[in-house]
Image (cartoon, rainbow, N blue to C red):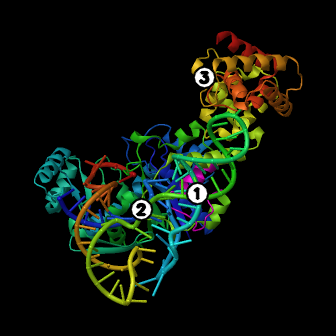
Amino acid sequence: MIRTRLAPSPTGYFHIGTLRTALYCYLLAKKNKGKFFLRLEDTDQKRSIDGALENILNTLDWAGINPDEGVMYKNGVVSEAGEMGPYTQSKRIPIYHKYIKQLLDKGNAYHCFCSPERLAKMREEQIKNKRPPMYDRKCLHLSEDEVRKAIESGEPYVIRQKIPRDTVLEFEDLIRGKVKFDCSILDDQVLVKSDGFPTYHLAHVVDDHLMKTNPVIRGEEWLPSTPKHILLFNAFGFKVPEYAHLPLLLNKDKSKLSKRQGDVAVEDYIKKGYLRDAIINFVVFLGWNPGTEQEIFNIEELIDEFSLDRVHKGGAVFDIDKLNWFNGSYIRKLSIEEFVSRIKPYLLDAGFPLDDYPDGYMLKASKTVQERVKYFAEVPDLMWFYFNTPKEYDGSLILNERMKVTIDIAKKALEESVKLLYGINDFSEENLKEVLVNLVKDIGLKNGQVFWPMRAALTGEKFSPGVFEVISVLGKEESIKRLKKCLEII
RNA sequence: GGUCCCAUCGUCUAGUGGUCAGGACAUCAGGUUUUCAUCCUGAAAACAGGGGUUCGAUUCCCCUUGGGACUGCCA
């Protein structure tokens, strides 16, 4: 039975790498008719942030990744479901204490009363002397009596894992194959902090055993501490789960994907107007591929195709250009109604008075930009002239050397087109095209010499949808008004 | 510094001993077109280096180099 889990900490935003891990876990579970559950790793009281859990739940919900068990919403309220709970680590403290006692009794762990200050100083000196920073086991040699007395007198302490330093450990990673470690350089890791909370290491081993997680899918940054975890599983007499360590997501400079170099929070991309399916499609392909040349996949297809043995070992650079391409291609597939309803909030947000325009105006205007949108947040910049009049025209906009638009030609084009538009009433794109193309012929100019200055006058932009489209949207009155205004200015 | 992981076009990747090293994004050129975008066509672009093994290595092994992660009472 495949049981995968996502185990995020409520420490802030939802990282794009966490989304990928969630996706892989979810896909694998669904494909194998297994279970996917959510466990909250809130053992660091200092770093826990209010609202972070809701953010995790909301993001997962947005992505359509619904856990079968664990922490989830029930009627809009955060709650838990499943047989193996609680799924919130802060509610499992007694469980960890029960298990750590076993370790203490067996001599696989010991109390340590060293102060953070002493530890810091020790570490500093070790680094200075080019020695690996490691705990010096000062407290390992305390007698039972000394330990008892210290505890009774209320001295703060942590509990450390006693690493059997004479072992060499080998394990088979599902993605990387054989990985070998020499335990002699492993540090006596803290398992229980002085506040009584477990560290990740203890919590991972106890919980993933109790919750029957298999395989454990997590980021590559955990690979170096895996031997400690295996030692712990062994010390408890638990069966060691299978591990799949996922390659890292990277910045452009190949360092671990981080906030400093762009957006790493899923919510940032949602805000910018990236489509869920595009983000999922893109993110899944960072480190995995189906082995065919198909690139566009929906979630159902991903469930069918996904397998861990096609996951890469090397890290993958997060390439925004490719995301934009995925997103643009998904946007172009949207129905126009869907497209309109998606971009409305962005237009409203930009302050455009959408309500002042007749029904159908939005629809028509939107149609002209759908194929050029990469993400919704750029829509206001693409459509502003449908809701505002261009204020100024400078020569470099109306004139165009390459199109051979001189000031005289621009004037003539605008004058003639105004005259023409006065005389017609069919403002469909098709008719506009027909009459304007004829006009060009009649006055002996080239298409670009007439259409470029018109389009520029109408939109105030160097790049925009075509003249016929724009006039058709703007209508007779507004189009003529803008063309005349431009004529006055130049 | 130490340990571990990784290494095919700029980027995401296919490839599992014999391929003209394939695709996609990005780039460039051409076409469609009033501009941009879309769409179509095409081009340029990679096996990090050195040793082995082998009739033959991108592919297997070793070394070097490069990159990364970890090295917390964070996860």
Disc 2 is attached to a residue of which chain? A
Residue at horizontal 73 percent and vertical 21 percent from the top: A413
Instruction: Judge from the rendering whether residue A150 lies leftward or rightward of residue A93; answer left or right.
Output: left
- Residue A225 shows up from this direction: yes
Residue A170: % across, % down: 33, 75
Residue A471: % across, % down: 77, 25
Observer-side mark, 1 or 3, equals: 3
- Residue A69: mark: 1
Q: Which quarter of the figure is the N terminus of chain A placed in?
A: bottom right
Nearest the eye: A222 or A336: A336
Chief secondary structure of the magenta portion: loop
| Quadrant of the rendered image containing residue A220 | bottom left
Q: Mark 3 or mark 2, which is nearer the start of the sequence? A: 2
Q: Mark 3 or mark 1, which is nearer the start of the sequence? A: 1
Q: Mark 1 or mark 2, which is nearer the start of the sequence? A: 1
Give the spatial CA distance, label 2 vs label 1. 31 Å
Q: Residues at marks 1 and 3, common chain?
A: yes
Q: Are marks 1 and 3 in contact (CB under 8 Å)?
A: no
Residue type indicated by callout 2 = Gly
Residue type indicated by callout 1 = Glu
Residue A355: % across, % down: 75, 21
Residue at mark 3: A397
Nearest the eye: A280 or A334: A334
Residue B18: % across, % down: 48, 80
Q: Secondary structure at mark 2?
A: loop
Residue at mark 2: A314
Nearest the eye: A44 or A429: A429
| Mark 3 neighbour density, 10 Å: few (under 14) some (14–19) many (20 or more) | some
| Mark 2 neighbour density, 10 Å: few (under 14) some (14–19) many (20 or more) | few
Magenta stretch, residue numbers: A277-298
